[in-house]
Image (spheres, rainbow, N blue to C red):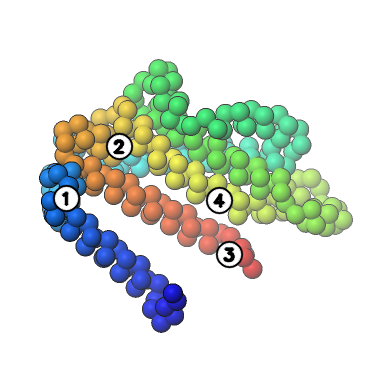
Amino acid sequence: MKLPFVPSLTISTLAVIVLALAWQIVSTSGWIPQGYLPSPAELFRETVVLVREGYKDASLWQHIEISLYRTLAGFALGVLFGVPLGLLTGFSRVGGAIASPIMAFVRPIPPIAFIPMVVLYFGLGEVGKVILIFWTSFNYVHVNAHAGAANVPIAYLRAAKSLGLTRFQLFTRIVFPASIPQIFTGLKVAMALSWAVVVAAELTGAQSGLGYMIADAALTFRIPVVFIGIALIGAIGLLLNLFLNLLESRLVHWRGR
């Protein structure tokens, strides 16, 4: 059914309100054992407590900050190495032949499968978590940068060669600009996965961060804190994705035209 006169934002807001009301009714109806599904009102009260008092000798903002630091540090390293290498292997036939079988082998392995190895070699400190995030982001940034450089329209390449561009000029003026939209696709996927993996890493071995807060709260049956931690992960992930979308709209202003 079409609602041509109702703005999309209004429809989305109403949907969220209806969901919150349904959640409130179900959580207070007695259909679910008490304590298993906190109501929105309970979550709001617990959020106020967390903001004021923190969790386990650290403020809520400190838990968020350390998770963001681990994610962004590993993500930045992954971009720093993944984008140039992906462009190189996509542009160079020899480079692609060398890297493709190796990356095709390691890419299907879930990042969390490396957690025991990371703990074994780097311990439970920050280095291991950052390396795990680096590997996650590197994989997806590399594959998209490679695809962007390898799939530049042949018409662009022929036109550049007919104008007498050198191989370096061909890369900097044609291949790299044409690869930017695909690179941003990789950045968004890598950011989402990096944020998910850092939480998984904190669930298994950390004394701070949102993942640690969720795992510890679950052990002590502080269910509202678990829900709040999950909601914060979703909200921060959404904000990170919106930032990349905004950056893409500014840098890739020609896309879709």
Q: Which residue is the site of mark 1?
A: 31
Work out how far the residue at label 4 is from the one at label 2, CA to CA, in angstroms. 26 Å
Task: Give the answer, above or below, for where 184 lies relative to 141.
Answer: below
Q: Which residue is the site of mark 4?
A: 185
Earlier in the chain: of badge 2 and badge 1, it is 1
Q: Which residue is the site of mark 3?
A: 253
Residue 249 at x, y = what percent? Answer: 53, 62
Q: Is residue 95 left or right of residue 129?
A: right
Earlier in the chain: of badge 3 and badge 1, it is 1
* Nearest-to-viewer mark from 2 and 3: 2
| Disc on res. 229 | none
Q: Which residue is the site of mark 2?
A: 211
Earlier in the chain: of badge 4 and badge 2, it is 4
Three-letter code for the amino acid on which mark 3 is drawn: His
Q: Is residue 10 left or right of residue 25?
A: right
The reply to whether discs 4 and 2 touch (Cβ–Cβ < 8 Å) is no
Q: Residue at x 25, y 30 (%)?
A: 207
Q: Is residue 165 left or right of residue 16?
A: right
